[in-house]
Amino acid sequence: MEFPIINLEKLNGEERPTILAKIKDACENWGFFEVLNHGIEPEFLDKVEKLTKEHYKKCMEERFKEHIASKGLNDVVTEVKDVDWESTFFLRHLPVSNIADLPELSDDYKSVMKQFASKLETLAELLLDLLCENLNLPKSYLKNAFHGSNGPTFGTKVSNYPPCPNPDLIKGLRAHTDAGGIILLFQDDKVSGLQLLKDGEWVDVPPVRHSMVVNIGDQLEVITNGKYKSVLHRVIAQPEGEGRMSLASFYNPGSDAVIFPAPSLVAEEKNEIYPKFVFEDYMKLYAGLKFEAKEPRFEAMKGNNVKLDPIATV
């Protein structure tokens, strides 16, 4: 059982069918895969990593230690089920960036993260089109389905997972599926910790230098009528070392986008399994139920009686 690592270098050559087949298999059987040669320069990613780690040391580390001490988490003796051992902040890219509004970020870091967002947006849209190709959907179907009236929502959760004295009692991040569309993760290549649930077992997502981890969110599960499923994943805290860096970027539907199974995929299955709903309504529900099973969330959305929005069907 080998985690899918896919090299995109020859995507536009004769190896395209092979690469598409690997992506298809990963989406259907894993909900996760890792891409190499994805178009974002290694030297640029090194700069993102360096500045992210410097920012944590300068602005976040002491605050995290104080937070942990205030909650008495250094000395726990039983499992903690309502707190994650992570230090995070959030950058919003679309529809409107908030990077300029974050005073703690250095000018250099702000500039680099704006570039990072632009490069990730391009990669996310390329991957969505590859998914369309595999699903026999029109090109840009998924991008259009995410559009709403103001385009997609897109942001990056910047996380650090410092060493934890009791990693058997506190998770770095508790098990959950991601609420949104397609998620791109740039993770530390020296410290592991990310795991996904496959066939009832927790499997490590290998840290590979300069790779981008891709995973399916709940909205893609709905649009594909369950052909591709979002998968439970978690972060295991590590007892020692420098800690783990993680930049998870979420390319999600616009807040007013209407999400529903693609009609051609419903026809294929002869059964519409998922409801129609407005993305913002799903997110309001998810906020309180993130660490619980996704199926009741989908079930709760069935009572919405949303009329189809023409924007979403283009």
Image (cartoon, rainbow, N blue to C red):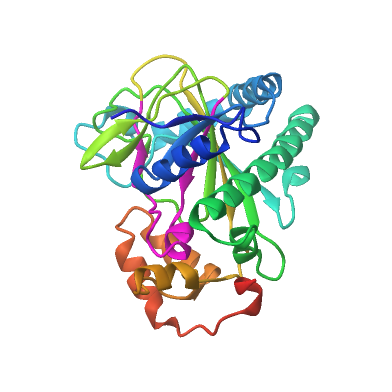
Q: Is residue 89 left or right of residue 197?
A: right
At 44% across and 45% down in the image, what residue appears?
A: 24
Q: Position of residue 171 (x, y in %)?
A: 32, 35
Residue sitting at the far top:
241
Residue sitting at the far front:
14
Q: Position of residue 215 (x, y in %)?
A: 46, 44
Q: Is residue 42 left or right of residue 235?
A: right
Q: Is residue 296 shown above or below 113?
A: below
* Residue 301 lies in the magenta stretch: no
Q: Is residue 286 shown above or below 291?
A: below
At 40% across and 54% down in the image, what residue appears?
A: 228
Q: Is residue 199 left or right of residue 281?
A: left
Q: Position of residue 306 (x, y in %)?
A: 50, 83
Res 303 seen here: yes
Res 174 seen here: no
Locate residue 212: give its quadrant: top right
Judging depth in this view, the residue of 156 and 35 nearest the camera is 35
Judging depth in this view, the residue of 125 and 156 nearest the camera is 125
Judging depth in this view, the residue of 233 and 89 nearest the camera is 233
Judging depth in this view, the residue of 296 and 63 nearest the camera is 296
* Residue 214 lies in the magenta stretch: yes
Locate residue 175: give its quadrant: top left
Magenta residue span? 211-237
Q: Position of residue 269 (x, y in %)?
A: 35, 68
Quadrant where the image shows the N terminus? top left
